[in-house]
Image (cartoon, grey):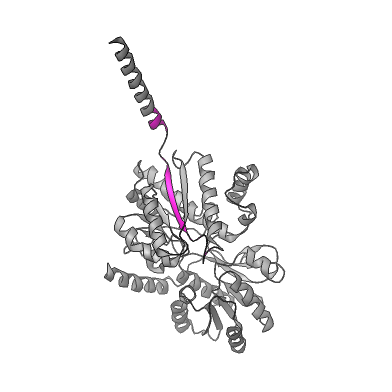
Amino acid sequence: MKSRFLTLAAGLGMAIAAMHSAQAAPETIKFAGCYDLTKSYGFVSPQIAQAARDYVKLFNLQGGIEGHPVEMLIQDHGNEPQRGIECYEKMKREGAITFEFLSTPVSRAMVPRAMADGNVMIQPYAGRGDAVDGEVFSWIFPMGPTYWAQVANDIQYIKNQSKGSLKGVKVAFIYPDYPFGQEPIGVLKTLAEREGYELMLAPHPMPGNDQAAAWTQIRRFNPDWIIGWNLSNMHVVASREMKRNGIPISKYIAVNWFNEVDINNLGPENAKGIKRATNVVGGQDHPLIQKIIKELYDKGQGSGDRKTMNDVYYNSGLASYVIVVEGARLAIKQYGWPLTPEKMKKGLESIKNFDAGGFIAPITITAKDHGGGGKTRVDMWDGSKWVPQTDWLSAYSDVVQSIVKKESAEFAKTK
Protein backbone atom coordinates (compact mmCIF):
# COMPACT_ATOMS: atom_id res chain seq x y z
CA MET A 1 0.00 0.00 0.00
CA LYS A 2 2.80 2.39 0.95
CA SER A 3 4.58 1.65 -2.33
CA ARG A 4 1.41 2.21 -4.36
CA PHE A 5 0.72 5.47 -2.49
CA LEU A 6 4.23 6.74 -3.19
CA THR A 7 3.91 5.81 -6.86
CA LEU A 8 0.53 7.57 -7.09
CA ALA A 9 1.87 10.65 -5.29
CA ALA A 10 4.88 10.78 -7.59
CA GLY A 11 2.65 10.51 -10.65
CA LEU A 12 0.35 13.23 -9.31
CA GLY A 13 3.35 15.45 -8.62
CA MET A 14 4.61 14.98 -12.15
CA ALA A 15 1.19 15.80 -13.57
CA ILE A 16 0.94 18.98 -11.49
CA ALA A 17 4.46 19.97 -12.52
CA ALA A 18 3.60 19.38 -16.18
CA MET A 19 0.44 21.45 -15.80
CA HIS A 20 2.36 24.33 -14.24
CA SER A 21 4.98 24.03 -16.99
CA ALA A 22 2.30 24.24 -19.68
CA GLN A 23 0.80 27.28 -17.96
CA ALA A 24 4.23 28.90 -17.72
CA ALA A 25 4.97 28.49 -21.44
CA PRO A 26 2.78 30.90 -23.45
CA GLU A 27 1.21 29.55 -26.60
CA THR A 28 2.87 30.48 -29.88
CA ILE A 29 1.27 32.82 -32.43
CA LYS A 30 1.74 31.49 -35.95
CA PHE A 31 1.65 33.39 -39.25
CA ALA A 32 1.62 31.45 -42.53
CA GLY A 33 3.37 32.46 -45.73
CA CYS A 34 2.54 30.25 -48.69
CA TYR A 35 4.84 31.76 -51.34
CA ASP A 36 6.04 31.11 -54.86
CA LEU A 37 9.71 30.64 -54.02
CA THR A 38 10.71 28.73 -57.15
CA LYS A 39 8.85 29.86 -60.28
CA SER A 40 7.26 33.11 -61.48
CA TYR A 41 7.88 35.19 -58.33
CA GLY A 42 11.25 33.77 -57.34
CA PHE A 43 12.80 37.20 -57.87
CA VAL A 44 10.83 38.70 -54.96
CA SER A 45 9.33 36.05 -52.64
CA PRO A 46 12.60 34.91 -50.98
CA GLN A 47 13.33 38.47 -49.78
CA ILE A 48 9.73 38.83 -48.52
CA ALA A 49 10.04 35.54 -46.58
CA GLN A 50 13.46 36.54 -45.22
CA ALA A 51 12.11 39.84 -43.92
CA ALA A 52 9.07 38.21 -42.32
CA ARG A 53 11.26 35.68 -40.50
CA ASP A 54 13.67 38.40 -39.38
CA TYR A 55 10.88 40.55 -37.96
CA VAL A 56 9.43 37.61 -36.04
CA LYS A 57 12.89 36.83 -34.62
CA LEU A 58 13.39 40.45 -33.60
CA PHE A 59 10.00 40.56 -31.90
CA ASN A 60 10.71 37.35 -30.02
CA LEU A 61 13.91 38.91 -28.67
CA GLN A 62 11.69 41.67 -27.30
CA GLY A 63 9.38 39.22 -25.54
CA GLY A 64 6.97 38.34 -28.35
CA ILE A 65 3.49 39.76 -28.88
CA GLU A 66 2.03 40.55 -25.48
CA GLY A 67 4.28 37.85 -24.03
CA HIS A 68 3.54 35.22 -26.69
CA PRO A 69 6.32 33.91 -28.96
CA VAL A 70 5.79 34.20 -32.70
CA GLU A 71 6.53 31.69 -35.45
CA MET A 72 6.62 32.30 -39.21
CA LEU A 73 5.57 29.24 -41.21
CA ILE A 74 6.87 29.29 -44.80
CA GLN A 75 6.13 26.90 -47.67
CA ASP A 76 6.48 27.04 -51.47
CA HIS A 77 3.42 26.80 -53.71
CA GLY A 78 5.19 27.40 -57.04
CA ASN A 79 2.47 29.86 -58.15
CA GLU A 80 0.03 26.95 -58.53
CA PRO A 81 -3.46 27.44 -57.02
CA GLN A 82 -3.86 23.76 -56.08
CA ARG A 83 -0.56 23.78 -54.19
CA GLY A 84 -1.68 27.02 -52.55
CA ILE A 85 -4.82 25.28 -51.32
CA GLU A 86 -2.74 22.38 -49.98
CA CYS A 87 -0.44 24.80 -48.18
CA TYR A 88 -3.39 26.66 -46.69
CA GLU A 89 -4.96 23.46 -45.35
CA LYS A 90 -1.64 22.35 -43.85
CA MET A 91 -1.01 25.72 -42.20
CA LYS A 92 -4.57 25.76 -40.90
CA ARG A 93 -3.97 22.40 -39.18
CA GLU A 94 -0.76 23.80 -37.69
CA GLY A 95 -2.71 26.63 -36.09
CA ALA A 96 -1.82 29.66 -38.25
CA ILE A 97 -3.80 32.80 -37.43
CA THR A 98 -3.09 34.65 -40.73
CA PHE A 99 -2.40 33.43 -44.26
CA GLU A 100 -0.51 35.09 -47.13
CA PHE A 101 0.01 33.82 -50.70
CA LEU A 102 1.91 36.61 -52.58
CA SER A 103 0.56 35.56 -55.97
CA THR A 104 -2.48 36.97 -57.71
CA PRO A 105 -3.62 33.62 -59.23
CA VAL A 106 -3.22 31.77 -55.93
CA SER A 107 -4.67 34.63 -53.86
CA ARG A 108 -7.74 34.85 -56.08
CA ALA A 109 -8.26 31.10 -55.76
CA MET A 110 -7.95 31.28 -51.98
CA VAL A 111 -10.35 34.18 -51.31
CA PRO A 112 -13.60 32.11 -51.28
CA ARG A 113 -12.03 29.42 -49.07
CA ALA A 114 -10.64 31.86 -46.49
CA MET A 115 -13.96 33.74 -46.47
CA ALA A 116 -15.95 30.53 -45.96
CA ASP A 117 -13.62 29.37 -43.16
CA GLY A 118 -13.56 32.75 -41.41
CA ASN A 119 -9.76 33.01 -41.53
CA VAL A 120 -7.73 36.20 -41.91
CA MET A 121 -6.00 36.32 -45.28
CA ILE A 122 -3.57 39.13 -45.96
CA GLN A 123 -2.79 40.04 -49.56
CA PRO A 124 -0.34 42.93 -49.79
CA TYR A 125 1.05 43.57 -53.30
CA ALA A 126 -1.05 40.87 -54.96
CA GLY A 127 -4.57 39.53 -55.35
CA ARG A 128 -7.86 41.35 -55.82
CA GLY A 129 -7.75 45.14 -55.84
CA ASP A 130 -11.39 45.36 -54.73
CA ALA A 131 -10.58 43.40 -51.54
CA VAL A 132 -10.00 46.73 -49.80
CA ASP A 133 -13.82 46.75 -49.49
CA GLY A 134 -14.10 45.23 -46.03
CA GLU A 135 -17.89 45.16 -46.15
CA VAL A 136 -17.72 42.55 -48.93
CA PHE A 137 -14.31 40.95 -48.29
CA SER A 138 -14.67 40.75 -44.53
CA TRP A 139 -11.72 38.36 -43.99
CA ILE A 140 -9.32 39.68 -46.68
CA PHE A 141 -6.80 42.40 -45.85
CA PRO A 142 -4.68 44.07 -48.59
CA MET A 143 -3.31 46.35 -45.82
CA GLY A 144 -2.00 48.88 -48.30
CA PRO A 145 -2.61 50.69 -51.58
CA THR A 146 -4.02 48.86 -54.57
CA TYR A 147 -2.41 49.30 -57.97
CA TRP A 148 -5.40 51.52 -58.74
CA ALA A 149 -4.54 53.84 -55.85
CA GLN A 150 -0.86 53.80 -56.73
CA VAL A 151 -1.39 54.86 -60.35
CA ALA A 152 -3.88 57.55 -59.26
CA ASN A 153 -1.19 58.94 -56.96
CA ASP A 154 1.29 58.88 -59.87
CA ILE A 155 -1.10 61.04 -61.89
CA GLN A 156 -1.42 63.45 -58.97
CA TYR A 157 2.37 63.72 -58.86
CA ILE A 158 2.46 64.51 -62.59
CA LYS A 159 -0.28 67.10 -62.09
CA ASN A 160 1.73 68.76 -59.32
CA GLN A 161 4.77 68.84 -61.60
CA SER A 162 2.61 70.43 -64.31
CA LYS A 163 1.64 73.42 -62.13
CA GLY A 164 -1.74 71.99 -61.18
CA SER A 165 -3.13 71.32 -64.65
CA LEU A 166 -2.92 68.25 -66.87
CA LYS A 167 -4.52 69.85 -69.93
CA GLY A 168 -2.44 68.91 -72.95
CA VAL A 169 0.05 66.81 -70.93
CA LYS A 170 1.07 63.57 -72.64
CA VAL A 171 1.30 60.42 -70.51
CA ALA A 172 2.48 57.08 -71.88
CA PHE A 173 1.75 53.85 -70.02
CA ILE A 174 4.05 50.91 -70.84
CA TYR A 175 3.13 47.52 -69.44
CA PRO A 176 3.35 43.76 -70.05
CA ASP A 177 0.21 42.57 -71.81
CA TYR A 178 -0.78 40.48 -68.81
CA PRO A 179 -3.35 40.97 -65.99
CA PHE A 180 -0.79 42.61 -63.69
CA GLY A 181 0.12 45.16 -66.36
CA GLN A 182 -3.46 45.78 -67.42
CA GLU A 183 -4.68 46.46 -63.86
CA PRO A 184 -4.28 50.30 -63.84
CA ILE A 185 -5.74 50.99 -67.32
CA GLY A 186 -9.29 51.71 -66.14
CA VAL A 187 -8.11 54.34 -63.66
CA LEU A 188 -5.79 55.95 -66.22
CA LYS A 189 -8.59 56.24 -68.80
CA THR A 190 -11.05 57.65 -66.26
CA LEU A 191 -8.58 60.26 -65.05
CA ALA A 192 -7.62 61.17 -68.64
CA GLU A 193 -11.26 62.03 -69.32
CA ARG A 194 -11.49 64.06 -66.13
CA GLU A 195 -8.15 65.88 -66.25
CA GLY A 196 -7.67 66.28 -69.99
CA TYR A 197 -4.29 64.63 -70.42
CA GLU A 198 -3.50 62.59 -73.53
CA LEU A 199 -2.98 58.92 -72.71
CA MET A 200 -1.12 56.41 -74.82
CA LEU A 201 -1.15 52.70 -73.99
CA ALA A 202 1.99 50.81 -74.99
CA PRO A 203 1.71 47.06 -74.23
CA HIS A 204 4.55 44.67 -74.86
CA PRO A 205 4.51 40.85 -74.89
CA MET A 206 5.60 38.70 -71.97
CA PRO A 207 8.21 37.98 -70.70
CA GLY A 208 9.14 41.57 -71.51
CA ASN A 209 12.47 41.11 -73.26
CA ASP A 210 11.13 42.56 -76.53
CA GLN A 211 9.89 46.11 -75.98
CA ALA A 212 11.30 47.68 -79.16
CA ALA A 213 7.96 48.22 -80.91
CA ALA A 214 6.37 49.75 -77.81
CA TRP A 215 9.23 52.21 -77.34
CA THR A 216 9.17 53.21 -81.00
CA GLN A 217 5.50 54.14 -80.50
CA ILE A 218 6.37 56.06 -77.34
CA ARG A 219 9.14 58.00 -79.11
CA ARG A 220 6.68 59.09 -81.80
CA PHE A 221 4.14 60.06 -79.14
CA ASN A 222 6.81 62.19 -77.40
CA PRO A 223 5.31 61.98 -73.89
CA ASP A 224 5.95 64.35 -71.02
CA TRP A 225 5.84 61.40 -68.60
CA ILE A 226 6.00 57.62 -68.78
CA ILE A 227 4.47 55.31 -66.18
CA GLY A 228 6.16 51.90 -66.31
CA TRP A 229 4.31 48.85 -64.97
CA ASN A 230 7.20 46.47 -65.52
CA LEU A 231 8.77 43.75 -63.38
CA SER A 232 12.38 42.79 -62.69
CA ASN A 233 14.55 42.77 -65.85
CA MET A 234 11.76 44.45 -67.85
CA HIS A 235 12.90 47.74 -66.30
CA VAL A 236 16.44 47.17 -67.54
CA VAL A 237 15.14 46.47 -71.04
CA ALA A 238 13.00 49.62 -70.81
CA SER A 239 15.97 51.77 -69.83
CA ARG A 240 18.01 50.41 -72.74
CA GLU A 241 15.17 51.21 -75.15
CA MET A 242 14.76 54.70 -73.69
CA LYS A 243 18.42 55.41 -74.31
CA ARG A 244 18.20 54.03 -77.87
CA ASN A 245 15.19 56.25 -78.57
CA GLY A 246 16.66 59.35 -76.95
CA ILE A 247 14.10 59.49 -74.12
CA PRO A 248 15.38 60.87 -70.77
CA ILE A 249 15.14 58.32 -67.95
CA SER A 250 13.92 61.11 -65.65
CA LYS A 251 10.51 60.87 -67.37
CA TYR A 252 10.02 57.29 -66.14
CA ILE A 253 7.93 56.54 -63.02
CA ALA A 254 8.19 52.86 -62.13
CA VAL A 255 5.66 50.75 -60.28
CA ASN A 256 6.70 49.77 -56.74
CA TRP A 257 8.34 46.58 -58.13
CA PHE A 258 11.54 48.41 -59.05
CA ASN A 259 14.36 47.46 -56.73
CA GLU A 260 18.03 47.91 -55.97
CA VAL A 261 18.98 44.93 -58.15
CA ASP A 262 17.43 46.82 -61.07
CA ILE A 263 19.42 49.93 -60.10
CA ASN A 264 22.65 47.93 -60.13
CA ASN A 265 21.78 46.35 -63.48
CA LEU A 266 21.12 49.79 -64.96
CA GLY A 267 24.18 51.24 -63.25
CA PRO A 268 23.67 53.64 -60.31
CA GLU A 269 24.81 56.64 -62.33
CA ASN A 270 22.82 55.66 -65.44
CA ALA A 271 19.69 55.31 -63.31
CA LYS A 272 20.01 58.83 -61.92
CA GLY A 273 16.67 60.62 -62.13
CA ILE A 274 14.44 57.55 -62.43
CA LYS A 275 11.40 57.58 -60.15
CA ARG A 276 9.51 54.91 -58.28
CA ALA A 277 6.15 54.79 -56.51
CA THR A 278 6.30 53.17 -53.08
CA ASN A 279 4.49 52.72 -49.79
CA VAL A 280 7.64 51.83 -47.82
CA VAL A 281 10.94 53.56 -47.11
CA GLY A 282 13.83 52.27 -49.25
CA GLY A 283 17.44 51.63 -48.22
CA GLN A 284 18.89 50.59 -44.85
CA ASP A 285 19.02 53.88 -42.96
CA HIS A 286 15.73 53.47 -41.09
CA PRO A 287 16.12 52.54 -37.38
CA LEU A 288 14.08 49.33 -37.85
CA ILE A 289 16.49 48.00 -40.47
CA GLN A 290 19.48 49.08 -38.39
CA LYS A 291 18.06 47.26 -35.38
CA ILE A 292 17.60 44.05 -37.37
CA ILE A 293 21.19 44.30 -38.61
CA LYS A 294 22.52 44.87 -35.08
CA GLU A 295 20.40 42.30 -33.25
CA LEU A 296 20.37 39.55 -35.88
CA TYR A 297 22.87 39.84 -38.73
CA ASP A 298 25.79 41.15 -36.67
CA LYS A 299 25.27 38.13 -34.42
CA GLY A 300 24.91 35.59 -37.22
CA GLN A 301 21.18 35.13 -36.59
CA GLY A 302 19.75 36.55 -39.84
CA SER A 303 17.25 34.55 -41.88
CA GLY A 304 19.08 34.89 -45.20
CA ASP A 305 21.88 36.53 -47.11
CA ARG A 306 22.81 39.91 -45.65
CA LYS A 307 23.21 41.31 -49.18
CA THR A 308 19.52 40.86 -49.98
CA MET A 309 18.55 43.13 -47.10
CA ASN A 310 19.49 46.17 -49.20
CA ASP A 311 16.45 45.69 -51.38
CA VAL A 312 13.01 47.32 -51.37
CA TYR A 313 11.54 43.82 -51.70
CA TYR A 314 12.96 43.04 -48.27
CA ASN A 315 11.55 46.30 -46.92
CA SER A 316 8.19 45.43 -48.47
CA GLY A 317 8.14 42.14 -46.56
CA LEU A 318 8.85 44.01 -43.35
CA ALA A 319 6.10 46.50 -44.21
CA SER A 320 3.56 43.66 -44.31
CA TYR A 321 4.54 42.09 -41.02
CA VAL A 322 4.92 45.25 -38.97
CA ILE A 323 1.20 45.68 -39.75
CA VAL A 324 0.28 42.05 -39.02
CA VAL A 325 2.15 42.07 -35.71
CA GLU A 326 0.55 45.37 -34.73
CA GLY A 327 -2.88 43.91 -35.50
CA ALA A 328 -2.16 40.85 -33.35
CA ARG A 329 -0.86 43.05 -30.52
CA LEU A 330 -3.99 45.19 -30.55
CA ALA A 331 -6.20 42.11 -30.74
CA ILE A 332 -4.71 40.52 -27.62
CA LYS A 333 -4.51 43.81 -25.73
CA GLN A 334 -8.14 44.69 -26.43
CA TYR A 335 -9.83 41.29 -26.48
CA GLY A 336 -7.52 39.01 -24.49
CA TRP A 337 -6.11 35.54 -25.05
CA PRO A 338 -6.62 33.20 -26.85
CA LEU A 339 -6.07 34.93 -30.16
CA THR A 340 -8.88 33.78 -32.46
CA PRO A 341 -9.45 34.65 -36.14
CA GLU A 342 -12.31 36.96 -35.13
CA LYS A 343 -10.09 38.79 -32.63
CA MET A 344 -7.28 39.03 -35.18
CA LYS A 345 -9.71 40.53 -37.67
CA LYS A 346 -10.87 43.12 -35.14
CA GLY A 347 -7.28 43.86 -34.16
CA LEU A 348 -6.35 44.71 -37.75
CA GLU A 349 -9.51 46.80 -38.09
CA SER A 350 -8.48 48.89 -35.08
CA ILE A 351 -5.13 50.06 -36.53
CA LYS A 352 -5.12 53.86 -36.68
CA ASN A 353 -2.54 56.13 -38.31
CA PHE A 354 0.17 53.51 -37.91
CA ASP A 355 3.47 54.07 -39.75
CA ALA A 356 5.96 51.92 -37.80
CA GLY A 357 8.05 54.93 -36.88
CA GLY A 358 7.99 56.41 -40.38
CA PHE A 359 8.84 53.13 -42.10
CA ILE A 360 5.58 52.84 -44.07
CA ALA A 361 2.87 55.14 -45.36
CA PRO A 362 0.49 55.83 -42.45
CA ILE A 363 -2.44 53.42 -42.53
CA THR A 364 -5.81 53.32 -40.84
CA ILE A 365 -7.71 50.07 -41.29
CA THR A 366 -11.42 49.90 -40.55
CA ALA A 367 -14.20 47.37 -41.02
CA LYS A 368 -15.09 49.21 -44.24
CA ASP A 369 -11.56 49.90 -45.54
CA HIS A 370 -9.13 46.98 -45.40
CA GLY A 371 -6.63 48.87 -47.55
CA GLY A 372 -5.61 51.42 -44.96
CA GLY A 373 -6.11 54.60 -46.98
CA GLY A 374 -4.18 53.97 -50.21
CA LYS A 375 -1.21 56.25 -49.57
CA THR A 376 2.00 56.11 -51.59
CA ARG A 377 4.75 58.55 -52.52
CA VAL A 378 7.17 59.06 -55.40
CA ASP A 379 10.90 58.64 -54.73
CA MET A 380 13.74 59.55 -57.10
CA TRP A 381 17.14 57.87 -57.45
CA ASP A 382 19.83 60.56 -57.11
CA GLY A 383 22.74 58.34 -58.12
CA SER A 384 23.37 56.84 -54.69
CA LYS A 385 20.07 56.75 -52.79
CA TRP A 386 16.30 57.20 -53.03
CA VAL A 387 15.07 60.72 -52.30
CA PRO A 388 11.36 61.38 -51.57
CA GLN A 389 9.74 63.71 -54.10
CA THR A 390 6.37 63.91 -52.36
CA ASP A 391 4.78 63.40 -48.98
CA TRP A 392 2.62 60.31 -48.52
CA LEU A 393 -0.52 61.04 -50.51
CA SER A 394 -3.84 59.50 -51.50
CA ALA A 395 -5.41 61.11 -54.57
CA TYR A 396 -8.61 60.68 -56.59
CA SER A 397 -10.16 58.50 -53.91
CA ASP A 398 -13.60 58.91 -55.50
CA VAL A 399 -12.40 57.35 -58.76
CA VAL A 400 -10.57 54.51 -56.98
CA GLN A 401 -13.52 53.80 -54.70
CA SER A 402 -15.99 53.75 -57.58
CA ILE A 403 -13.95 51.01 -59.26
CA VAL A 404 -13.56 49.14 -55.96
CA LYS A 405 -17.33 49.21 -55.34
CA LYS A 406 -18.15 48.14 -58.90
CA GLU A 407 -15.78 45.17 -58.77
CA SER A 408 -16.68 44.09 -55.24
CA ALA A 409 -20.39 44.24 -56.08
CA GLU A 410 -19.77 41.81 -58.91
CA PHE A 411 -17.98 39.47 -56.49
CA ALA A 412 -20.81 39.78 -53.95
CA LYS A 413 -23.26 38.49 -56.55
CA THR A 414 -21.31 35.25 -56.81
CA LYS A 415 -21.31 34.52 -53.09
Q: Residue furthest right?
A: 269
What residue sits 47% from the left and 62% below the top? 78
Splitting the image into 4 quarters, where does residue 217 fall? bottom right
**Residue 86 in picture, x, y percent from top left:** 39, 57
The reply to whether residue 316 is in sight is yes
Q: Residue furthest top?
A: 2
From this view, report whether residue 204 is shown above or below residue 412: below
**Residue 172 in picture, x, y percent from top left:** 55, 82
Splitting the image into 4 quarters, where does residue 333 fall? top left
**Residue 260 in picture, x, y percent from top left:** 63, 63
Please identify the quadrant where the C terminus is shown: bottom left
Q: Nearer the viewer, residue 71 or 364?
A: 71
From this view, report whether residue 253 is shown above or below residue 20: below
What residue sits 39% from the left and 52% below the top? 90
Instruction: Give yes or no for residue 25 being in the magenta stretch.
Output: yes
What residue sits 52% from the left and 75% below the top? 155
**Residue 211 in picture, x, y percent from top left:** 59, 81
Q: Nearer the viewer, residue 5 or 391?
A: 5
Q: Residue furthest bottom?
A: 220
The reply to whether residue 138 is in sight is no
Task: Write down the region rendered in magenta.
Answer: 20-41
| Residue 68 as seen in the image, left or right of residue 340 | right
| Residue 368 as seen in the image, left or right of residue 264 | left
Q: Report how many numbered discs are placed on residues in the image.
A: 0
| Residue 341 as seen in the image, left or right of residue 192 | left
What residue sits 47% from the left and 59% below the top? 35
Q: Nearer the viewer, residue 1 or 36?
A: 1
Please identify the quadrant where the N terminus is shown: top left
Instruction: Give yes or no for residue 145 being in the magenta stretch.
Output: no
Q: Nearer the viewer, residue 361 or 305?
A: 305
